């Protein structure tokens, strides 16, 4: 702690000296924005993308509309480095950059890719996938970004900027969307001045669609969704040089999510096509649930951004509070197979098999810790078992304060402080038949489960709370020895505190992974009930040299250190072996990068290239434990090496035509033995990390009867990708390996002469390519060890949609 205070004192002294330092030389000021320039804020200043010495892909609203990108799930189309991974619950959705993301999703593990919306860091990545409309720009920042971009950006950051109020005139827009699978939506926006000193912007949306997966038990689709929300901004400028922006948003999404068909059955044969009633395989779109799966998310927040001009300096403050709720009911066995061979009551009380179903349910409900419904329910006097109920609650307060010096002299800098306090709680009840004990359950080829031992029924109940407190001071200094050379040094001192409260109770027969019960009269007494705290202090930063030969040709080289804090396995499946390994050490990254950004032939051709090499130390992931339970254990996986080359090329031979391409070729592999007692994945690939990805985009504007028509098409090819099972990281024939695939999209948009009306038509997955958005290991009671379920993307099949909008 003394070292921490010493570092803070050093940074504070350096900041004070920097504020008082005179400008020793003059540097040419940033050239004004020209047509076609994209302005980004990767360095906490508004700068031309071509002048920023960071690998960035940035796309503005007009391009997003032409590409018919309507969800963050599709952001992978705009960047070769960005990938999205679906999961069986919305809270587990995940971004990865350059093949690095989060491979374990306990509430005690934070993402490696930071997601930032309007300057506010989002705690849970899943909360960003709904409620985003009225966008101004999306930036994908590649490589460690922790110096300036807030919390947990050891692999990179996705920065999303929504539009602000129009201070000049009142205006609005209404857009209608319709597509296959009963997809319908409406987006609306209204903005304008309220007075000389105030302005507003409010936007809202409603969206509904049917899922692609069919539940054979009910002969209906699952993964159906309905979402709606509103976002508002109020701007107040009492006088020149002082601006306040109050922003608020609220979003709700409900879905019977997520139905994931079985892709690969286990070698043990627990699951057969006859048993599940579905055609197991890569083209499977069927499930067979006797539980109505339900999921909903509520996401809301408020922020106040204040910006004050202090002479030539700018002081910025961002204060934010966010709240996220996620609820899910899941079918644990994944079938509609009834239990036979034992009465439902016996599953709860072998000593009193004659009690009623309601009485048995009440008996077990009394043991629970949290207020969720139990994982069984009564239906017509009988018990329906095999559900899990989960509620995740996250509340986050954050504060950032920055002072930016004027530019144009020998030195310019940004000084800042950051505070982040997040409390996340997960309540979980999970029940079912423990099938991995010999003699408990028989799995015939018919669609019936025969329970041969009443003690086979197990359940567990959990309340786990994780508080994460992050405090930081940061500074970024630019020196300009000449008008062409810029030397940059950035530093961030971080102090992390992790507070963990964990309570778990099991039923009389234990739980799915064999956690021992206290038994008998003490059944229901918590097996785990503890409170632990951890803390860590780290210094990270960036050093960059940039040389601008001309306004259109810049090269740079950089060194950066990234950091993600300690983690705990705050989940149902924590075992004694898992506890002994906690906390997982911080995940750090060391990155070297060289790049060139160039424009040629009067800026008709843009070529940006980047080469990088990054080493992750203490990479946080999960693997099978060593205690025989098969439960995943959170670990620090030693070193992970990544290197590659990426590029963006844009050709504008004439104003109406834009052709572009981007690519990433990388090599990602583990360098250390991982869980050496059970697994050796040295040289193996990490999850969700394709070694090649590239895309082509074309856009052409042509006049049509006084209107303007835009024809756009894009194609994205993604190399083979490993999902879920790190044990197969070195297996080229792994069932967890998604084959390479390419997806093409096309659209046409007609715009009226004044831009008031727009009509659009788009086709997604033009050539009907089959691919999956993710895979996961499924319960042993469904598929046995090694069974694989797949998450189907919205465009698993080709589909057509259209939009109509009116602006005023």
Image (cartoon, rainbow, N blue to C red):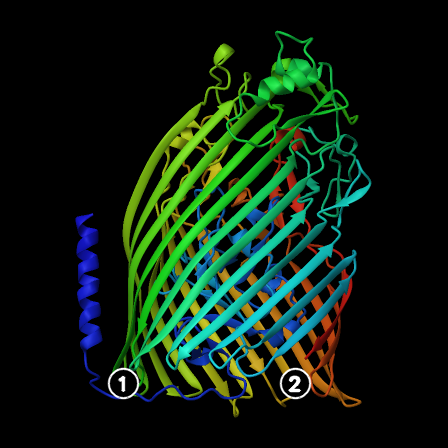
Say whether disc 2 or disc 1 marks the residue closer to the N-terminus. Answer: 1
Residue 448: image x %, image y %? 76, 24
Which residue does the image show at 73% across and 80% down from the upper left?
757
Assess disc 1: are there few (<14), some (14-19) or many (≥20) residues with their C-alpha within 10 Å of its C-alpha: many
Which sits in the foreground, 274 or 119?
A: 119
Residue 80: image x %, image y %? 55, 66
Residue 515: image x %, image y %? 49, 23
Which residue does the image show at 56% across and 47% down from the upper left?
91
User: Is residue 569 visible in the rendered structure shown here?
Assistant: no
Residue 720: image x %, image y %? 60, 55
Which residue does the image show at 78% across and 64% down from the upper left?
800
Quarter of the rendering occupied by the C terminus: bottom right
Instruction: Give the spatial CA distance, label 2 vs label 1.
Output: 39 Å
Say the numbered circle drawn on residue 657: 2
Residue that protrudes farthest toward the front in the picture: 195
Q: Which residue is mark 1?
A: 409
Which sits in the foreground, 390 or 485?
A: 390
Position above or below: 547 against 206: below
Q: Secondary structure at mark 2?
A: strand
User: Is residue 750 visible in the rendered structure shown here?
Assistant: yes
Name which quarter of the figure residue 551 lies in. bottom left
Q: Secondary structure at mark 1?
A: loop
Compared across the picture, whether 778 is left or right of 46 comes to right
Position above or below: 236 against 547: above
């Amino acid at each position: 702690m003394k070292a921490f205070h010493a570092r803070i004192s050093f940074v504070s002294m350096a900041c004070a000296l920097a504020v008082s330092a005179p400008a020793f030389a003059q540097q040419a000021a940033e050239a004004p924005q020209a047509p076609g320039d994209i302005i980004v804020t990767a360095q906490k200043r508004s700068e031309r993308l071509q002048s920023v010495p960071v690998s960035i892909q940035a796309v503005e609203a007009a391009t997003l509309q032409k590409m018919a990108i309507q969800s963050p799930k599709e952001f992978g189309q705009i960047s070769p480095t960005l990938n999205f991974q679906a999961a069986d619950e919305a809270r587990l959705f995940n971004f990865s950059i350059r093949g690095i993301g989060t491979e374990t999703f306990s509430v005690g593990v934070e993402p490696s890719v930071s997601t930032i919306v309007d300057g506010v860091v989002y705690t849970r990545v899943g909360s960003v996938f709904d409620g985003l409309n009225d966008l101004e720009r999306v930036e994908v920042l590649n490589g460690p970004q922790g110096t300036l971009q807030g919390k947990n950006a050891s692999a990179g950051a996705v920065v999303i900027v929504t539009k602000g109020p129009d201070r000049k005139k009142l205006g609005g827009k209404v857009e209608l969307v319709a597509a296959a699978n009963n997809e319908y939506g409406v987006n609306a926006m209204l903005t304008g001045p309220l007075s000389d000193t105030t302005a507003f912007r409010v936007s809202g949306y409603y969206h509904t669609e049917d899922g692609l997966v069919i539940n054979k038990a009910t002969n209906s689709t699952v993964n159906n969704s309905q979402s709606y929300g509103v976002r508002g901004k109020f701007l107040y400028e009492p006088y020149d040089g002082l601006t306040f922006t109050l922003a608020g948003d609220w979003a709700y999404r409900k879905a019977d999510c997520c139905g994931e068909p079985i892709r690969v059955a286990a070698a043990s044969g627990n699951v057969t096509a006859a048993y599940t009633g579905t055609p197991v395989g890569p083209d499977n779109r069927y499930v067979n649930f006797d539980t109505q799966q339900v999921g909903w998310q509520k996401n809301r927040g408020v922020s106040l951004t204040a910006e004050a001009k202090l002479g030539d300096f700018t002081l910025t403050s961002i204060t934010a509070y966010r709240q996220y709720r996620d609820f899910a009911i899941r079918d644990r066995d994944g079938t509609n197979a009834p239990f036979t061979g034992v009465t439902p009551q016996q599953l709860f009380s072998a000593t009193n098999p004659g009690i009623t179903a309601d009485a048995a349910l009440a008996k077990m409900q009394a043991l629970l810790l949290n207020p969720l419904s139990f994982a069984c329910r009564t239906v017509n006097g009988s018990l329906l078992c095999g559900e899990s109920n989960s509620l995740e609650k996250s509340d986050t307060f954050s504060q950032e304060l920055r002072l930016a010096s004027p530019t144009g002299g020998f030195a310019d800098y940004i000084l800042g402080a950051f505070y982040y306090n997040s409390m996340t709680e997960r309540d979980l009840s999970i029940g079912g038949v423990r099938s991995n004990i010999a003699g408990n359950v028989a799995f015939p080829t018919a669609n019936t489960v025969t329970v041969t031992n009443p003690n086979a029924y197990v359940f567990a109940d959990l309340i786990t709370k994780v508080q994460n407190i992050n405090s930081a001071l940061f500074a970024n200094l630019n020196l300009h020895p000449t008008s062409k050379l810029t030397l940059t040094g950035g530093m961030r001192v971080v102090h992390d505190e992790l507070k963990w409260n964990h309570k778990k109770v099991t039923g009389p027969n234990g739980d799915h992974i064999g956690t021992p019960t206290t038994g008998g009269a003490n059944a229901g007494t918590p097996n785990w009930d503890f409170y632990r705290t951890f803390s860590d202090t780290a210094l990270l930063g960036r050093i960059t040299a940039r040389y601008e030969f001309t306004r259109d040709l810049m090269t740079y080289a950089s060194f950066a250190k990234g950091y993600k804090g300690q983690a705990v396995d705050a989940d149902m499946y924590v075992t004694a072996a898992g506890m002994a390994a906690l906390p997982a050490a911080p995940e750090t990254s060391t990155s070297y990068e060289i790049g060139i950004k160039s424009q040629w032939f009067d800026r008709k051709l843009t070529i940006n290239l980047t080469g990088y090499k990054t080493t992750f130390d203490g990479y946080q992931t999960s693997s099978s434990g060593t205690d025989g339970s098969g439960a995943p254990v959170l670990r620090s996986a030693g070193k992970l090496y990544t290197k590659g080359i990426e590029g963006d090329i844009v050709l504008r031979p004439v104003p109406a035509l834009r052709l572009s391409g981007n690519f990433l070729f990388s090599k990602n592999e583990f360098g250390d033995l991982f869980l050496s007692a059970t697994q050796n994945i040295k040289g193996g690939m990490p999850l969700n990390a394709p070694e090649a990805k590239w895309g082509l985009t074309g856009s052409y504007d042509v006049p049509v009867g006084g209107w303007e028509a835009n024809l756009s098409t894009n194609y994205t090819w993604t190399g083979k990708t490993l999902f879920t099972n790190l044990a197969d990281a070195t297996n080229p024939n792994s069932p967890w390996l998604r084959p390479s695939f390419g997806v093409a999209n096309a659209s046409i948009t007609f715009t009226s002469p004044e831009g008031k009306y727009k009509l659009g038509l788009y086709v997604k997955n033009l050539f009907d390519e089959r691919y999956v958005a993710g895979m996961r290991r499924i319960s042993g009671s469904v598929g046995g060890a090694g069974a694989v379920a797949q998450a189907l993307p919205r465009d698993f099949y080709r589909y057509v949609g259209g939009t109509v909008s009116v602006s005023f």
